[in-house]
Image: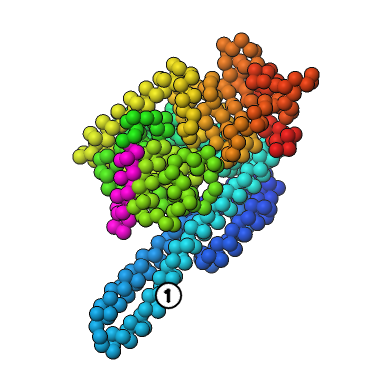
Amino acid sequence: MFKLWFALTFSFLQLASTCYSCGEEIRIGRPHDIAQHALVEARKYGLYPTIYFSFGNCCYFYSSYRAKFHYLMEYAQEEFESFDIYVSQDIEEIGQRLAEWRTCQSEYAAKQIACYEPILNRKSAALREKQAYYPIVQNILSTRLNDIASACEQIYTFCMENHGHTTSACYERGLIYYDQGKYLESVNDISKVIDRQDDVFSQLDYLLIAGKSYSNVGLYNEAIAALNQLLAQDPKNKEALLERAVVYFETGNFDQSIEDFLSSGLQSKALDSSRIDFATGFWSGATEGFKEFSTEFFPSLLSTARGLGSVALWIVSDPLGFSEEMYNACHNFIQFLSHHPLPEIVEAMSPQLKALIYDSDSLSLKQKGDHLGYLIAKNGVELCAIAGASKVYGEIRKANAVLTLEALSSPTQKTKVLDKAVAWGEKHSAELKKMRENETYIKTLRGQYFSEATIRKTLHEMGVQTFPRPRGIPNNWTATFSDKNFGMKYIHPTNTHTYVRVMPGDAKSPNSWQHKPYVQRVHEGNYLDNYGEMFDSYGKKYTRQSKEVHIPIEEFNFTTIIKEQKL
């Protein structure tokens, strides 16, 4: 609760550095209405936080709502877990008593059975109701927080375009982008204010988000610089130490990675015995996935340079070394899948994913673990980002990193982890070499799905510059590699012939309009210019090579095209 109070107090103190009218719009406008509605919805399913909880006058910022919603999510999870444990124990004890009384023929036993059977039924019904309500509450909170983020993003964008780059507007929009998994966009905003901020506490906040964002897109030198700057002022910052340990691992500096991890003092919590079936299933599914890994390409090979983004390193050293944090993150991801619609092309990734989306309620704990273990073995923890579960991605990424770094720090497991990491790094480098030397090789990756962060990370490791996602492209459009010229492609969720290509430009091209970074917009197979037209002034249809459809990246306006085409 102290963390929540501190975050809200800090946000209120920041008010002087933002635009007052825009802050008021957030405090009493649409974001506030969405938050109040979310609380009303959640209460219908039994979520009653402390009487002091409210979305009060201090919510001038997205970060304020974010802190409160995260508190509500944690409160709901803790309440559910404590209820689950308490009632399950009662049910087990009553069940044992009833079993004993049923073996007796006495009048006393009959009375006890008549008394306790209804109690058992009521407790069982209450537990089933709570188990059904918990994912609904989490879905309400996460969906409404996303709605608030979208509303606040519009306000901050307007503020920055009309009132200048105020410190709070840059940071808050950068935080929204970070939560949405738009890491390059996040650092673009936050980097504008890091050096400007005089308050040491807010600067540390900015540096941590910047360091994590750089790390997620493979800009490791920039990540180290931001994290070093943070740790110079706050040497015991656990999150920064863990993130720098991750970066050191991915760049092959294993000794420094161990040192940072041990300095963080982070430890995983042992898995509760009631969840061993999930861990057993997870190991079985991951093992099956890794068998296929030796004979075919897996997306996780690109998502992580030394295997830290894969479960391969800790699961081979300790198959059942599953942690409580890893289980909770996996459980939250499965709940996310069953309550959030995914793009059709993502749903089609594998039958295991479809089973988790549509048949989760009928699967046993072991079956859920088996399906998810296979999927993460194939796609890495980036699977959560591909599905759009950015918050869960952060949870599972952290839990996985702690498990891996614990194994690396263990004298009995270190050699095994290092051998696996080195072998992974060699395969990763070989894959990048194929892409670098044979541009058409990228076409063989069609049908594979990557998070936007993985695509950026891969291109950055190849020395190719990437650019922020053009504003206005919906979040449910899927990112992939462009067929050629090392660009990025954003594809409509149900129509693969509708997409946007963002290209770095080619100085060697015979066409001058392709020398600098440009964007191409395609709607149902038709190339459009920046006014949304598919024909030139002579009535001739544009082709891929037409000058007019190579729109300079700084001039591209996705929103205008959508409006002009009335899509």
For residue 17, say whether it is visible: no
Which residue is at the far left? 412
Residue 141 image position (x, y, % from top left): 54, 55
- Count of labels in the image: 1
| Displayed quadrant of residue 290 | top left
Q: Is residue 539 visible?
A: yes
Counting from the top left corner in percent of width and height, residue 275 is at 32, 56
Q: Amino acid at mark 1?
A: Arg
| Residue at 30% in and 45% down | 284
Question: What's the magenta region?
Answer: 265-290
- Residue for badge 1: 122
The image shows residue 249 at horizontal and vertical percentages of 35, 33
Choose between 401 and 491: the one closer to the eye.
Answer: 491
Left/right placement of residue 28 relative to residue 398 reads: right
Above or below — where is 531 with respect to 285?
above
Based on the displayed image, in which of its 4 quarters is residue 528 positioned? Answer: top right
Task: Give the colour scheme of this rendering.
Answer: rainbow
The reply to whether the magenta stretch includes residue 242 is: no
